[in-house]
Image: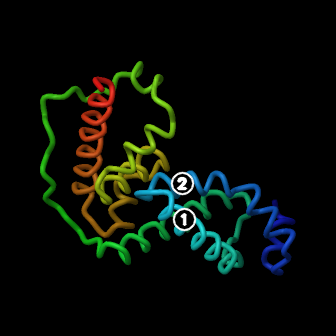
Amino acid sequence: MKKIIAGCIRRNVKSQKDLYDRYSSLMLGLCYRYAKNKSDAEDIFQEGFLKVFENIRQLRNPEVVEWWMKKIFINEAFKFYKKQTGLYLVDDITLLENSMSDNINDDILNKMETDELTRIIQNLPERMRMVFNMHIIEGFSHQEIANMLEISVGTSKSHLHDARKQLQRNIFIKKIV
C-alpha cells in the first residue's frame, strides 16, 4: 500500500488507478448509504475521489488509508447535502410511534435483500440517515458525530433513536406488504 500511496503523491496514473480499483466499491457503497438516490451517490463518489487524490499528501500513515478515505467521503456527503438542500440543524424531531419494539426482528432482516435495506435507509431524513450511518455502520461515537455535525451529543442520540424507530416501522410495513 505504501508504494501505491507514494505513486499517488507523485500523481502516477497507474497508482491512482490501483487505489481506485482497491477502494471504489467500498466507497461507492458508503456513498449509497448517505445519498438519497444513485445519482447523488455517484456525485458524492466522484467528488470524494477527487478530494482523495488532491489531499493524498496529507496521509501520514498508509495503513489507515481506508479510514482516512471514509472520512473524506463522509465529509463530501455532508457538503453535498448542505449545498443541495440547505441542510440545517434541527433539534426537535417528531418522535415516531413509541409502541414499537426496540429490536428489529432478525428474521426479517435476514430475508431482506441488501439493496432493499439500503433503499429503506436512503429514505430516512438527512440527519437521521447521517447519524445512523456514522454510528451503526462507520462506528463513530456520539461525541465524534456531534463534533462533525456541530450538534449536541443528545441530539445525535435522539437522531439515532428516531432513525431506528423509523427503520423498524418501515421494515415492519415492508414485511406486511
User: What percent of the width, then of the height, locates residue 164?
Assistant: 29, 40
Residue drawn at 44 percent across, 57 percent down? 37
Residue drawn at 40 percent across, 22 percent down? 106
Q: Amino acid at mark 1?
A: Phe
SS label for mark 1 = helix
Asked whether 85 or 75 is in front, the reply is: 85
Q: Residue furthest top?
A: 107
User: What percent of the width, then of the height, locates residue 17?
Assistant: 80, 66
- Residue 23 placement, left or right of 94: right
Quadrant containing the C terminus is: top left
Discs 2, 1 touching: Cβ within 8 Å: yes
> Please, is residue 147 above or below residue 108 in the view?
below
Residue 31 is labelled as none
Circle 2 Cα neighbour tier, 10 Å, few/some/many (<14 / 14–19 / ≥20): many
> Please, is residue 75 above or below residue 144 in the view?
below
SS label for mark 2 = helix
Quadrant containing the N terminus is: bottom right
Which numbered disc flags the more N-terminal residue, 2 or 1?
2
- Residue 45 placement, left or right of 142: right
Q: Amino acid at mark 2?
A: Leu
Residue drawn at 33 percent across, 25 percent down? 175
Circle 1 Cα neighbour tier, 10 Å, few/some/many (<14 / 14–19 / ≥20): many
Residue at image mark 2: 30
Residue 73 is labelled as 1
Q: Quadrant of residue 14?
A: bottom right
